[in-house]
Amino acid sequence: MKPNIRIKHPKTWAYREILLASKEGRPANLRNAILDGANLREAYLAGSDLAGVDFTNAYLGGADLSNANLKFANLTNANLCGTDLTNVDLTSANLGGANLTNADIKFADLVDATFADADLTRVDLEGSDLRGTNLSGTKGLQAASDWMNKNFNSTEEGYIVYKRVGAHTPFSIPDNWVIQEGSTIGEVCNANRTSMCACGVNFGTEEWCLSHLPELCLWECLIKWEWAADITVPYNVNGTARCGKLQLIRCIKNKVSYDY
């Protein structure tokens, strides 16, 4: 794909390298290039070496940067709307104030990266490594408490949640679980919010449960307030979350799935 490029100094080596790499169908080597303010809309830079590049105020909307090396890159205030950043290495990169609305950042290395004041609305962070990542002041990441309060009723004892239980779920029921009214079931909960599917006692909204695994018993459950600290809501929540412990209240009968 020929990138739509507008760079302040179009005859720079970086400009020539981007065009040549695109023509030859290979990743570009732009290590430490100065591309501040560049227009790289929909540019194809997959697998490229972009370590240390200065992309300050650059426009990279819709670009393909998948599998690229962006270690120590400066993407301050860059426009990355809809950009493909899957499997990228953004170790110690600076994305402060960047607009990443609808960006795909699945399975990326974001160790020690800075996203301070960035817009992460509808960003897909599934499987990404956020160790040491600065998310201070970011917009668009839903707080776990907001999602819980929006989707579940609560009582004096805790949250009322829902869970499908039966023999035909993707994961077998632990041997120590007793499935009966009043029983408490528990499991070590993986607190990583970028993991959509991980260990723990999974539960969902009533709407999600009614539209999935309708052949299984739908249980109304209670997560007591003293157990709420172990609730993990993935950033890309799809109607389900997980916790460390919940109590089975009753199996709801005669519930049918919605017609989706």
Image (cartoon, rainbow, N blue to C red):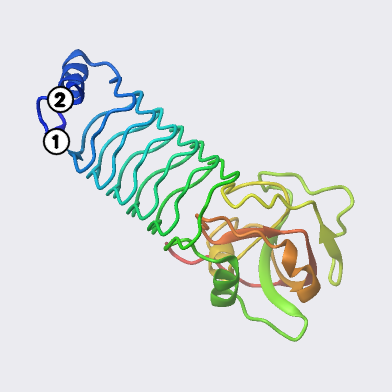
| CA separation in Å, label 1 and label 2 | 9 Å
Q: Is residue 123 above or below residue 152?
A: above
The residue carrying mark 2 is 12
Residue 170 x/y as whole percent: 66, 44
Which element type, helix, strand or loop, lies under badge 2? loop
The quarter of the rendered structure image containing the C terminus is bottom left
The mark total stands at: 2
Q: Is residue 82 toward the left or the right of residue 10 in the image?
A: right
Q: Residue at x 46, y 63 (%)?
A: 137
Q: Is residue 199 visible?
A: yes
Residue 12 x/y as whole percent: 15, 25
- Mark 1 touching mark 2, by CB under 8 A? yes
The residue carrying mark 1 is 7
| Residue closer to the observer: 134 or 82 | 134
Quarter assignment of residue 33: top left
The quarter of the rendered structure image containing the N terminus is top left
Residue 34 x/y as whole percent: 25, 33
